[in-house]
Image (cartoon, rainbow, N blue to C red):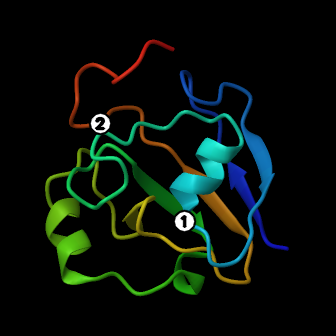
């Protein structure tokens, strides 16, 4: 089973993490299933950018971006060429290294951390 290495993030995952990631599941769902409460204001329907992540390794193994995701990513803070909306990035069969950006377009999280 592939793994996702989550780089340290001061709020969501201060020590970083290594997670088992079933193929066919979204990066966002894998994080949430492992108590990493990444923001997902639109409830994972590709209607916001709060679940934006930067895929540092394994980007090419993910499913291809659809136009709707590309359009939403244009609004994300700190956009990089290897940015994805974690709700749309589907794990394949390769390990990933993922960074959760320090900021999102939301100034306040949906829930207290």
Relative to residue 66, is residue 61 drawn left or right?
right
Say which residue appears at 34% left-offset and 22% top-offset.
Answer: 109
Crowd class of label 1 (few under 14; some 14 to 19; many from 20; radius 10 Å): many
Say which residue appears at 52% left-offset and 54% top-offset.
Answer: 28
Relative to residue 55, is residue 5 drawn left or right?
right
In-front residue for pair 36/96:
36
- Badge 2 marks a residue whose secondary structure is loop
- Badge 1 marks a residue whose secondary structure is loop
Residue 71: image x %, image y %? 14, 69
In-front residue for pair 81/29:
29
Q: Which disc, if any, is residue 54?
A: none
In the orientation shown, which residue stands out farthest toward the top?
Answer: 112
Residue 88: image x %, image y %? 41, 68
Q: Is 87 rendered above or below residue 25?
A: above
Say which residue appears at 67% left-offset and 46% top-offset.
Answer: 33
Q: Is 3 rendered above or below residue 58?
A: above
The N terminus lies in quadrant: bottom right
Relative to residue 100, is residue 21 drawn left or right?
right
Q: Quadrant of residue 20?
A: bottom right
Query: Badges 1 and 2: C-beta atoms under 8 Å apart?
Result: no
Say which residue appears at 22% left-offset and 30% top-offset.
Answer: 106
Residue 101: image x %, image y %? 42, 41
Q: Which disc, if any, is residue 104?
A: 2
Residue 49: image x %, image y %? 26, 50
Q: Is 11 rendered above or below residue 46?
A: above
Q: Which residue is mark 1?
A: 26
């Amino acid at each position: 089973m592939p793994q996702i290495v989550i780089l340290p993030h001061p709020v969501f995952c201060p020590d970083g993490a290594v997670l088992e990631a079933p193929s066919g599941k979204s990066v966002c769902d894998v994080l949430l299933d492992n108590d990493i409460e990444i923001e997902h204001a639109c409830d994972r329907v590709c209607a916001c950018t709060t679940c934006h992540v930067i895929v540092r390794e394994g980007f090419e193994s993910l499913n291809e971006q659809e136009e709707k995701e590309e359009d939403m990513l244009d609004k994300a803070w700190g956009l990089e060429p290897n940015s994805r909306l974690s709700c749309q990035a589907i794990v394949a069969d390769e390990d990933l290294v993922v960074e959760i950006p320090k900021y999102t377009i939301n100034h306040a999280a949906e829930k207290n951390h």
